[in-house]
Image: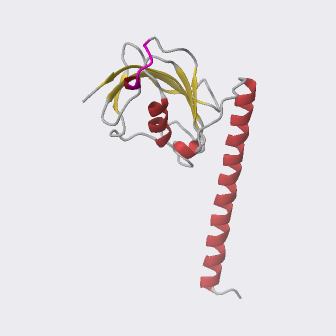
Amino acid sequence: MIKKKTYYIFISFFFVFSLVSCHKNQKDAELTLLSEYLEENNITEEPTADGLYVINTGFSTTESLKSDFPKKGDTVIIFYKAYLLSDPSIVFDEKTIDNPAHYVYLIDKVIPGWEEAVGLMKKDAPALIIIPSDLAYKGNQAGIIPPFSTLIFEARITDIKKP
């Protein structure tokens, strides 16, 4: 007869192994979906070292100045549409030109992928941002965003205000 302690250890190991296996399958599915999306949309830009994509989809209407990029403590005024790669019909957040987001760069608490993307965006230049789950909510549910979800943002910084 199996001792009670050994039984609980076995059950715990089985549960952890099942959970890890399930997460690996979800992560693999996310990577496959991202690869297909990049291919279908002819996206050839390389991601950053941690997997973020910031693709310029237009040109800045301002002259190229270093001040066109946000610095720590700047208030970034940005509008965007955010949806799931797995189901683009699910728009989980949207800020319009009439009601943009106001965000203090490197001060306000946001997901790491958003922080990095905003730092790479130039004022007035529209961008497509692809944030893999590792830079977003990982294996956690966040509102209507399922675990291991790649997030897509169509965004444009309209103004950068210095402190």
Q: Position of residue 162 (x, y in %)?
A: 27, 27
Q: Where is residue 34 in the image (x, y as percent from the top left)?
A: 68, 35
Could you tell whether 100 is left or right of 58 in the image?
left
Report which quarter residue 1 is drawn in.
Answer: bottom right
Which residue does the image show at 52% across and 36% down from the upper left?
A: 144
Which residue does the image show at 51% across and 18% down from the upper left?
A: 126
Which residue does the image show at 70% across and 58% down from the upper left?
A: 21
Report which quarter residue 119 is drawn in.
Answer: top left
- Comparing 70 with 63, the one in front is 63
Could you tell whether 24 is left or right of 78 in the image?
right
Q: Where is residue 22 in the image (x, y as percent from the top left)?
A: 68, 54
User: Compared with residue 54, is residue 12 higher up or lower down, i.e. above or below?
Assistant: below
Could you tell whether 28 is left or right of 96 in the image?
right
Report which quarter residue 53 is drawn in.
Answer: top right
Main SS, magenta region, reads loop
User: Compared with residue 4, is residue 141 higher up or lower down, i.e. above or below?
Assistant: above
User: Compared with residue 58, is residue 92 higher up or lower down, i.e. above or below?
Assistant: below
Q: Position of residue 41 (x, y in %)?
A: 71, 23
Asked whether residue 1 is drawn in magenta, I would say no
- Comparing 38 with 10, the one in front is 38
Could you tell whether 114 is left or right of 87 in the image?
left
**Start-end of magenta stretch:** 62-66
Which residue does the image show at 59% across and 84% down from the upper left?
A: 5
User: Compared with residue 156, is residue 105 higher up or lower down, i.e. above or below?
Assistant: below
Q: How is the image coloured?
A: secondary structure
